[in-house]
Amino acid sequence: MRVLLVDDEQELVETLAERLGIRGIEARWTTNGDAALALIDQEDFDLAVLDVKIPGINGINLHKMMKEKCPRMKFIFMTGHGSQDDFAAGSAETGVDYYLLKPVTIDELLHKMNQLMNK
Amino acid sequence: MVDRNSIGIASELQFFGKMTASISHEIKNIMAIINESAGLLEDYNLMAEKGIPIDPERIQVISQRVIAQIQRADGITANMNSLAHSVDEFQRSVGIKETLELAVGLAQRFADMRSITLKLQPSSDASAVITSPFHLQNLIWQMLDFAMDVSGDGKTVGLTFETGKASVKIRVTGLEELSNLSEPAFPTEKEKALLRMLNATIQQDEKAGEIHLFLPKDIDQALTANS
């Protein structure tokens, strides 16, 4: 499984990518939407984990753009915001099961990733 | 008809809500980073138990990351504390430099989201004004928010001040697009209510791409003088 992590908190995606790597999952990361779009043009990913609020293109719009480019790619939203609006927007895009609130445990993330890939 | 008082109260609550939501978001992010860092240390520990060698430099990087995040959280909670205490008294003496530092601290995440650089001009001026610190902070936020909208992504918005005899002029710079606006979008009723509250005035300098806030050094004296 190849995963792309997109979050403006570099330390977070960097650490998550390393932890996923330890578990045998190849993960790349970036901190903004434009770089994410450039990455999916160059490389293949099975799944993307997106923050709702990222600089430039927000996570919801980024999801739409990525989906257009890679229709088979799966998505998980991860956010620090717990507002009703964010939750509604995130869950409408990905389904309520694939919207995670930070801080997320690695086991929870892995569980969601496996669930989504086996769907 | 919209009641002016209700505009003021709604604006106050919106500002407080927006700032505390942003602060809680940042704290969540910090917790997430510390959480993952602790998790990575656990991973290293499990790997070491299985005989996989761990580079001590990696441990050092993670511990420095945690220290940096705790320092970041300390700064954010200090800003939150200052904002919370700004409602303790309706009016008191507030340092302009400190007020602008807090304003930039509170607006930083919003600027980052728009890829905008906020630049506070360094100053040794220790001027203070007697005013309502909460309403002043609210008004400066509205100015910065408008400036960030006008300047656009990737630009720099500056904040500086000059002290006059009876007033302090706070300048928000970097609004080069101000002259291209089809109609005056600032101040709105929300800012006008705050200006009345602070007995302050706002001017736009379209040529320079700046907004100027004139704040009386003493809100009471200004009110008496104008009454």
Image (cartoon, coloured by chain):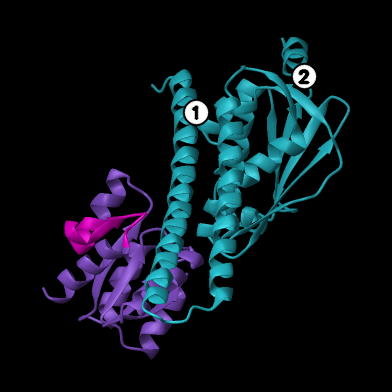
Chain colours: A purple, B cyan
**Mark 1 secondary-structure assignment:** helix
Q: Position of residue A29 (x, y in %)?
A: 42, 75
How far apart are labels 2 and 1 at the CA level?
Answer: 22 Å
Marked residue chain, label 1: B
First-in-chain label (2 vs 1): 1
Q: What is the quadrant of the C terminus of chain A in the image?
A: bottom left
Question: Which residue is rendered at x = 83% and y = 39% of the image?
Answer: B162
Residue A36 place in picture, x, y as percent:
41, 77
From the viewer's perspective, is residue B217 above or below residue A92? Answer: above
Image spot of residue A46 (x, y percent): 25, 81
**Res A114 seen here:** yes
Instruction: Please give the name of the residue rendered at 48% of the width and 63% of the height, measured from the top-left corner.
Output: A9
Nearest the viewer among A8 and B56 is B56
Tell whether position A99 is magenta. Answer: yes
Displayed quadrant of residue B95: top right
Give me the residue at 88% from left, 27% from top: B165
Extent of the magenta region: A90-105
**Residue topped by disc 2:** B218
* Amino acid type, residue under disc 1 in the picture: Glu
Q: In the picture shown, does residue A93 fall above or below B16?
A: below
- The number of discs equals 2
Q: Tell me the residue that label 1 is attached to.
A: B12
Quadrant position of residue A98: bottom left
